[in-house]
Amino acid sequence: MIWPQVDLAQMAALFPDMRVGIVDAIAERMTWETFEQLLRARRPRYYVTQVTAPTLQNDMLGAFLARSFGATTIAFGTHVTPLAKTTLAAYPALDFALRGEPELALRELIDALEASALETSAPDTDATTTARPAPDQSFTDLLTRMFREADPDWQPTPPVDSPITRAERLARVKGLAWREGDRITLNPDRPFIHNLDNLPLPRHDLLPLARYRAPLVGGPYAFAVTSRGCPAECSFCIKHVSYGRSVRFRSPENVVAEIELLASLGVRAVNMYADLFTLNRDHVLGICEGLLARGIRMRWTCNSRVDFVDEEMLQTMARAGCWMISWGIESGDEGILRRVHKGITPAQVERALGWSHSAGIRNWGYFIIGLPGETETTIRRTIEFSKRLPLELVLFHIAAPYPGTPFFFEVMDRGWFRPGTRWEQVDMDRSTVLDYPDLRAEELERWAQRAFREWALRPGPMWTYLKMLAGSPSLLRSAIEIGLESLGWARG
């Protein structure tokens, strides 16, 4: 499954006064040679890339190539938010890092850089430093409102002829990490956007929508962000790194408007993308009622915790087009769940998934092997628990201590990192970087592979797949690809 780059699409919507393009090299199956040719042809003024721990090396290689063609390079995401200074120090080709929520920081940074470029350009300079057309007044007013609602101390970018240096302009951009010579500066944190409805709808039209496919639903497939933030205290979760525990919702009307837009672009399935979609019952029901009232026939998926649903709510979601929910179950052992502050019990899991199954919604269970306190006994308990649940799909991840999470700091303090660990190895989908005293890395990997085999190679899951795929060649192709990939991994 390839995740649509909705974050880049959202950031692109903040620049109606500039020519913007999005390159999803993974979705396009682009080689490095092709990517380099694209950079040579386009020669972008700015290059913005999302950075995570597993993709760090590739992300920075992309930045290096863009820098070699003259681009100013900018990174955002869950890796550079907690490790901005470290990343800038290690990768000289990276010019700036945006910490936390990136949209307004990027807009303010680009405005500052454009003003500085105009101040220093000669009268006969080339087109790259020519003043770009100003956005229309309504958009300027919208930006001003967003900046001021988020930060009462915010002041507009000083005009070009102001007696202010480039460094002084950059120092005003909250949430920015930047370099000046050998010195790396972290500006103060940027407050969150209060009203997410103020954000323009993402530029989904810039994404290769036809390339996106979801397991057992096909495509075109897209993400619609419904909220930001999650109040849960799971010690392993990376979601808090960028958006914190305070939650901000888009209005149901705004979400439904985006789904209408996606339908007009030919999208057939949507993931309601949120740190916790079902957190607010009224919000979920408002979205469902909006979809039903407007007659929007869109299949959609979402995520949920088992303690934030009820039977009636799930039935309404099913009527509004929800066909699958991804559940963060993590473990079948109550002690492990308490240890990582998950805040749920196995009994709650069984009840919620039973409600979902009765409503006609398929269940996708996410489990994590190797959380703190794990033993062979707790792993066996999780495997047996997974086989009792009404699940159509499962993923058995291996615990990954992503930077900025409480789990990461615990692993650092206790010396649980495998010797020689590199950032790109911190990937819950691939292997493990953990070496517990009683469970070595190789054992964790074997247990994760065994867990998937034991769950999948049973008559129930196999029959479920056959029923779901009957009469749909596109879903069959998708399932074969996923199955071969998963079984290959499970065999080691």
Image: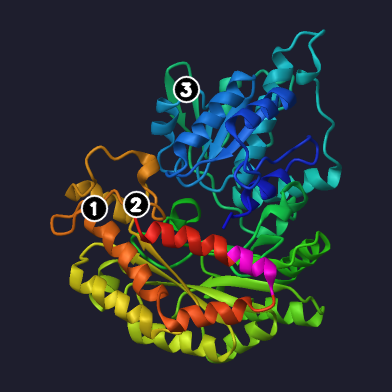
Residue under label 1:
441
Residue under label 2:
431
Q: Nearer the viewer, residue 187 or 398?
A: 398
Q: Which of 201 and 153 is in front in this view?
A: 201
Judged left or right of residue 308, residue 295 is right
* Relative image position of residue 220 (x, y in whole percent): 72, 61
Segment tinted magenta in the rendering? 472-478
Q: Determine whether 109 is above or below 280 in the image.
A: above
Q: N-terminal of the two: label 1 or label 2?
A: 2
What is the tally of numbered marks visible in this picture?
3
Q: Is residue 461 magenta?
A: no
* Relative image position of residue 462 (x, y in whole percent): 48, 78
Check contact, mark 1 vs mark 2: CB within 8 A: yes
Check contact, mark 3 vs mark 2: CB within 8 A: no
> What is the C-alpha distance between the residues marked 1 and 2?
8 Å
Mark 3 Cα-neighbour bin, 10 Å: few <14, some 14–19, many ≥20: some
Name the element at disc 3: loop
Tag 1: residue type? Ala
Q: Which of 361 and 475 is in front in this view?
A: 475
